[in-house]
């Protein structure tokens, strides 16, 4: 490990703070402002947009969560059907591959055994083409896929993935922008997505400035042995990622639920010992989410809600609000994830775990 921690105690903390730069680097020279430079994906990318009819995203762990977020974007903005699957499941079943389907393997390391096996399987399964979204240029995944989109997060040494995830999201937004071109120049969202995406480093920077408040919240969460994360829409997989970060490094049992599913089970768990962390950016689901939160509060739950300032949510009985900077809805998955990374980090510090090398886990799972 020849990367210096600098002023930071842990690689994870350093890597969380590197995200504005990692995002700026990952977006550099990828587009003209109006159009994605498709050659950046490799020579065979030319003409791809016209031929793609469907997308399969396959990955493990945090990279799988990036795929789950991207499905919301891809289907809404390209009109292409998109499915997301764990590599360990995909590789052992017989997937129905629709005509013109693009296989996308997402991986920080490019060496995860299941993701690599999934790619090899895909290459024999009649896909239109295979694309690797990866953080290591010389990895097996990048070498073996037909196309590659490199994230430029730099070396990630903390076992819990942070900057790799947000740069994967930026790469998946580039892919969304590129494929939106198929809707024709008038309907295309390409330029608009790219303009909004350019705000990613600043949006993440603004979330990082909340660290003092998040540290205070961590003191409350660290006292518990369980936590529930809830969100709707793309914030549901962000909740899944927040729960994963917390369990990986603090060993607190954490679960994520789509807020609309609370009535189907998790409400039974709600009491003062089960803090609920809710994600409330300013979007179409806000009213629905607020009524879900009221149901939790009415049952004696303690809610900590990360809410966009523009939502006007305020502290109330059982509800504590952490005001997030006003942000473009498209970028909320990035900025809210950063807030949850900081939360997990500070909880882990308080619980005295080995933040960079949590027990029983490996940075790259190269054997099955
Ligand atoms: C391990 C790491 C995770 C990572 C996952 C997938 O479980 O601890 O942080 O998300 O592998 O790794 P990959 O390199 O394929 O993204």
Image (cartoon, grey):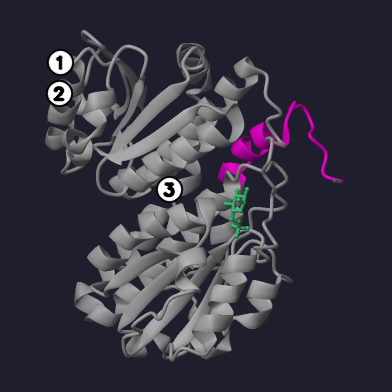
Residue at x 42%, y 87% (from the top left corner): 48
- Residue 67: x and y, percent? 42, 60
Which mark sits nearer the N-terminus, 2 or 3? 3
**Which SS class for mark 3?**
loop
Residue that mark 2 sits on: 295
- Residue 59: x and y, percent? 51, 63
Of badges 1 and 3, nearer the viewer stands 1
Residue 53 located within the stretch drawn in magenta: no
- Along the viewing direction, whichever of 226 and 249 lies nearer the viewer: 226
Specify whether residue 278 is in view: yes
**On-image quarter of the C terminus:** bottom right
Residue that mark 3 sits on: 199
Q: Is residue 145 left or right of residue 269?
A: right
- Residue 56: x and y, percent? 39, 73
| Relative to 269, residue 37 above or below | below
- Residue 132: x and y, percent? 56, 73
Which mark sits nearer the N-terminus, 1 or 3? 3
Specify whether residue 325 is in view: no
Q: Contact (CB < 8 A) between labels 2 and 1?
A: yes
Give the magenta range.
2-21
Q: Is mark 3 within 8 Å of ligand 1?
A: no
Residue at x 45%, y 47% (from the top left corner): 200
**Which SS class for mark 1?**
helix
């Amino acid at each position: 490990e020849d990367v210096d921690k600098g002023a930071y105690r842990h690689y994870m903390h350093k890597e969380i703070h590197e995200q504005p730069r990692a995002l700026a680097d990952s977006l550099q020279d990828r587009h003209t402002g109006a159009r994605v430079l498709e050659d950046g994906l490799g020579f065979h990318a030319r003409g791809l947009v016209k031929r793609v009819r469907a997308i399969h995203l396959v990955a493990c762990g945090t990279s799988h969560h990036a795929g789950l977020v991207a499905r919301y974007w891809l289907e809404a903005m390209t009109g292409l059907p998109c499915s997301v699957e764990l590599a360990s499941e995909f590789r052992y079943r017989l997937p129905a591959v629709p005509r013109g389907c693009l296989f996308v393997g997402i991986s920080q390391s490019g060496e995860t055994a299941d993701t690599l096996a999934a790619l090899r399987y895909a290459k024999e399964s009649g896909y239109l083409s295979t694309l690797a979204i990866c953080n290591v240029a010389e990895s097996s995944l990048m070498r073996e896929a037909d196309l590659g989109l490199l994230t430029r997060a730099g070396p990630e040494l903390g076992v819990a993935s942070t900057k790799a995830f947000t740069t994967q999201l930026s790469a998946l937004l580039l892919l969304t922008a590129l494929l939106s071109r198929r809707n024709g120049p008038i309907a295309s969202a390409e330029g608009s997505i790219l303009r909004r995406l350019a705000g990613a480093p600043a949006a993440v920077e603004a979330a990082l400035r909340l660290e003092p408040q998040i540290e205070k919240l961590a003191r409350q969460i660290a006292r518990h042995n369980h936590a529930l994360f809830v969100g709707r829409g793309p914030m549901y997989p962000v909740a899944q990622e927040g729960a994963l970060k917390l369990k990986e490094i603090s060993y607190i049992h954490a679960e994520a639920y789509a807020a609309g599913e609370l009535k189907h089970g998790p409400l039974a768990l709600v009491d003062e010992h089960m803090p609920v962390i809710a994600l409330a950016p300013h979007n179409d689901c806000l009213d629905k989410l607020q009524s879900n939160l009221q149901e939790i509060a009415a049952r004696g739950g303690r809610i900590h809600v990360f809410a966009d300032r523009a939502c006007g949510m305020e502290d109330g009985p059982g509800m504590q609000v952490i005001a997030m900077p006003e942000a473009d809805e498209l970028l909320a998955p990035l900025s809210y994830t950063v807030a949850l990374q900081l939360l997990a980090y500070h909880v882990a510090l308080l619980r005295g775990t080995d933040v960079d090398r949590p027990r029983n886990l490996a940075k790259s799972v190269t054997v099955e």
